[in-house]
Amino acid sequence: NFHSLFPRAKCTQLCDICFSEKDYENAIKYYSEALELNSSNAIYYSNRSLAYLRTECYGYALADATKALEIDKNYIKGYYRRATSNMALGKFKAALKDYETVVRVRPNDKDARMKYQECNKIVKQKAFERAIASDETKKSVVDSLDIENMTIEDDYVGPKLEDGKVTLKFMKEMMDWFKDQNKLHRKCAYQILVQVKDVLSKLPSLVEIELKEVSTLQITPSNVIFFDYQLDDLPITKGNGLKMFSFFFPQTEKITICGDTHGQYYDLLNIFKLNGLPSETNPYLFNGDFVDRGSFSVEVILTLFGFKLLYPNNFHVLRGNHETDNMNQMYGFEGEVKAKYTGQMFQLFSEVFQWLPLAQCINSKVLVMHGGLFSEDGVTLEDLRKIDRNRQPPDSGPMCDLLWSDPQPQNGRSVSKRGVSCQFGPDVTERFLEQNKLDYIVRSHEVKAEGYEVTHSGKCITVFSAPNYCDQMGNKGAYIHLRGSDLKPEFHQFTAVPHPNVKPMAYANTLMQLGMM
């Protein structure tokens, strides 16, 4: 109880402490308890709205800001909070309306006028983009590129594709090049994007793979376990001169599943250091949200796409809710690509993202998607196969749910804390798994303190691979090993590593940066 635990403390003091320590969950908790005692305090609602914004619960943030304004229509911060919530949800016209109100009330407020002008610019840009999109003759960026005649300058000493192909040597050189904060030549970046678009466009919306038990003896470091014994009568010797022999036992195939990476390139490198580089015998599945927020998103996505080209059957990538235009415009990826390359390259990234598969089924038993399950019962794997994914996500339906939904502890469904899709309970998960003859689902989409979370009686697993998310959450990252023999998830945790002094959201929309403050 709020008063029994802190009889002398004021709510604002407690929450100030929580905010300073970036403990937004407890800030939400304390404001909620305060609102139980005084439900007519607009400031409490507005401040809880900010805490919800910091935890990406944009639907809840919008509701609280709206409630604050219902209590006090003259409370200016309420309009700011509601505008930021609507911006985060891609509802730019609604945000503009609130900024207009602030400017009308405070005509001399330079900050308010700047935000109004910035939001108005976005609304006009969106209207222009819709007008262009309605032109049925719209061509792909690929059609306007002349990659062959792009010149690589003599002073560029970075990695280059070998005869236009991605090789392991190129990948290692590119990762080191990026690590030193260098930029890949635009010709090489375009080559990767054009090629990976072709590869992804040939995949189904639901990718299905089999992890097999190795039936033939393959003596390689990744699939054989060695036990050495010293014997006097066997001719096999090692460097120390001792006579040895080896028993070898084949292992079942395994795959590593990673969650959100969000532009945290140096943490991605750490995953490869801990778990080994991708290869035909060390396959990976990256489960969406490769970009935005972190300020090394270009480096992350070009590395992942490079490995997709190198190992098309052993390196898998799925779409997240941040592989979309609205999110990229607000949370940094569009700004980053334009800063490091051009607007044209961002348009090509957008085209490529639309071809990312939406889900992956492993051994017909484990379904992996970025967000979660569906707003309605009855969705089948066949329905997922039929999704026409080459588009920006709709506001509702299975494609939207796969990218946006979240689990909840109670049965049934409820309104999404994000303001998009829904939240689904253990009974929803149980019915879906039973209908589709699946064992469990793996999803990402939510930061977790331990890097992963197991809910719904073990049938809904969340994995998140961006440790100390946005340099402020203090969470661990994790990845999962699944083996073909039993598909039992093995969790591996890791912590954040240092990165160059470029802050998260460095390329994000100015309104989002200011609105979160």
Image (cartoon, rainbow, N blue to C red):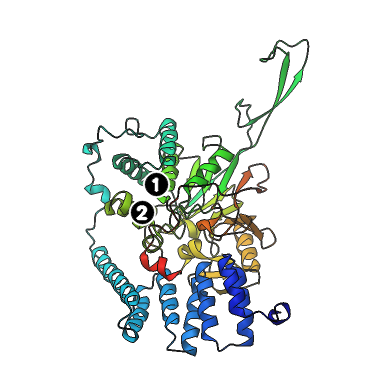
Going by the picture, which residue comes out furthest to the right? 232
Rounded to the nearest angstrom, the CA distance separating label 1 from label 2 is 28 Å
Q: Amino acid at mark 2?
A: Glu
The foreground one among 479 and 211 is 479
Callout 1 secondary element: loop
Q: Disc 2 marks which residue?
A: 336
Categorize mark 1 by other alpha carbons within 10 Å: few (<14), some (14-19), many (20+).
few
Residue 191: x percent and y percent? 32, 40
User: Of label 1 and label 2, which has the lower sequence position?
Assistant: 1
185 over 63 or under it: above or below: above
Relative to 425, does residue 265 appear above or below in the rendering?
Answer: above
Q: Position of residue 385 (x, y in %)?
A: 47, 55
Asked whether the beta carbons under mark 1 and mark 2 sit within 8 Å of each other, the answer is no
Front position among marks 1 and 2: 2
Residue picked out by circle 1: 202
> Of helix, strand and loop, which one carries label 2?
helix
* Residue at point 78%, 14% (across, down): 231
Q: Is residue 242 above or below residue 355?
A: above
Task: Please state the horizontal and vertical placement of residue 502, each as a whole percent of the image.
Answer: 43, 52
Query: Can residue 58 be seen in this snapshot?
Result: yes
Please identify the quarter of the rendering in which residue 217 is found: top right
Viewer can see residue 377: no
Q: Amino acid at mark 1?
A: Lys
Q: Position of residue 348 (x, y in %)?
A: 31, 51
Q: Is residue 45 left or right of residue 483?
A: left
Q: Is residue 336 left or right of residue 277?
A: left
